[in-house]
Amino acid sequence: MKWLNDKRIVYRRDPITDVPTFTTNTYSYYATGTYQSYNLFNSKSKITTYKSLKWHYLVLYYLNEDIDLENVFKFIANKENGFVTFFIKEKILKEIINDVLMQGGDPPVNRPRKIIFKDYSGLSFAEKMTIVGKLTGRRKLEADAIYESMLNINDIGGKITNAKLARLLNCSIRTIQRHTCAKLKLEKEKLNEEI
């Protein structure tokens, strides 16, 4: 991270045009969600797939349009630097970098965020989970609510478990199991792999 900071590489940004429904001194809440929040390397999670690596590159390219990022991409792809969990062949890396540079600086597809915790809020993981639980509240349990809770747990650096989801959504673990479809189970596995 020090290397990226020394190079003044932007790897996080709060929403620019989306206005939060309300803001406190520790977080901003977007009732309809925002796609404009980018926060790379926020936790100890590492990049585990080529698809994830390419997405990280697209975000970096979008946030740093006026900078030559080829050396940055190579630095991140080097397993010894701690960003990825696998070795990448030079040819494949070159193809990914060329593909990213050819796509231009359009905003990469991003997950919608409803709660964005402010940097240096001083909140513990448990305190963040309490806030997420209060804001999501008890409602008819739908796939969207489960998915949103998964994203919130992942965003604050925790492993997604049925027990945590049940606590957040104020229901039983069995209710979570009943309402978790195959697609959500796959997404849960993917998010947990990044931890």
Image (tube, rainbow, N blue to C red):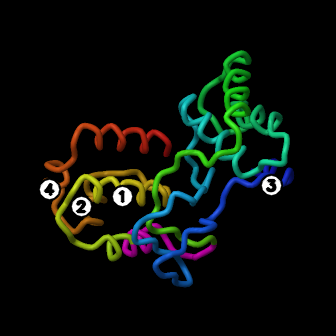
Q: Which residue is painted at 61% across and 49% down in the image? A: 107
Q: Is residue 24 left or right of residue 135?
A: right
User: Which comes sooner in the sequence, label 3 or label 4?
Assistant: 3
The nearer-to-camera label among 1 and 3 is 1
Residue 192 numbered mark, or none: none
- Residue 175 in the image, given as x and y percentages of width and height: 14, 56
- Residue 170 in the image, given as x and y percentages of width and height: 22, 68
Above or below, comparing residue 6 to residue 119 in the picture: above
Residue 166 numbered mark, or none: 2
The residue under label 4 is which amino acid type? Thr
Residue of label 3:
5
Q: Quadrant of residue 166?
A: bottom left
Distance between mark 2 and mark 3 Cα atoms = 38 Å
- Residue 194 in the image, given as x and y percentages of width and height: 50, 42
The mark tally for this picture is 4
Check disc 3 and report its element: helix, strand or loop: helix
Q: Is residue 124 magenta?
A: yes
Q: Residues within 10 Å of mark 1 (few under 14, many from 20)?
A: many
Q: Which residue is painted at 58% across and 76% down in the image? A: 121
Check disc 1 and report its element: helix, strand or loop: helix
Residue 175 numbered mark, or none: 4
Tag 2 and tag 4, C-beta contact below 8 Å: yes
Which segment is the magenta one?
Answer: 120-131
Distance between mark 3 and mark 4 Cα atoms = 44 Å
The residue under label 2 is which amino acid type? Ala
Residue of label 1:
148
Above or below, comparing residue 165 to residue 28 in the picture: above
Tag 2 and tag 3, C-beta contact below 8 Å: no
The nearer-to-camera label among 2 and 1 is 1
Check disc 2 and report its element: helix, strand or loop: helix
User: Which comes sooner in the sequence, label 2 or label 1?
Assistant: 1
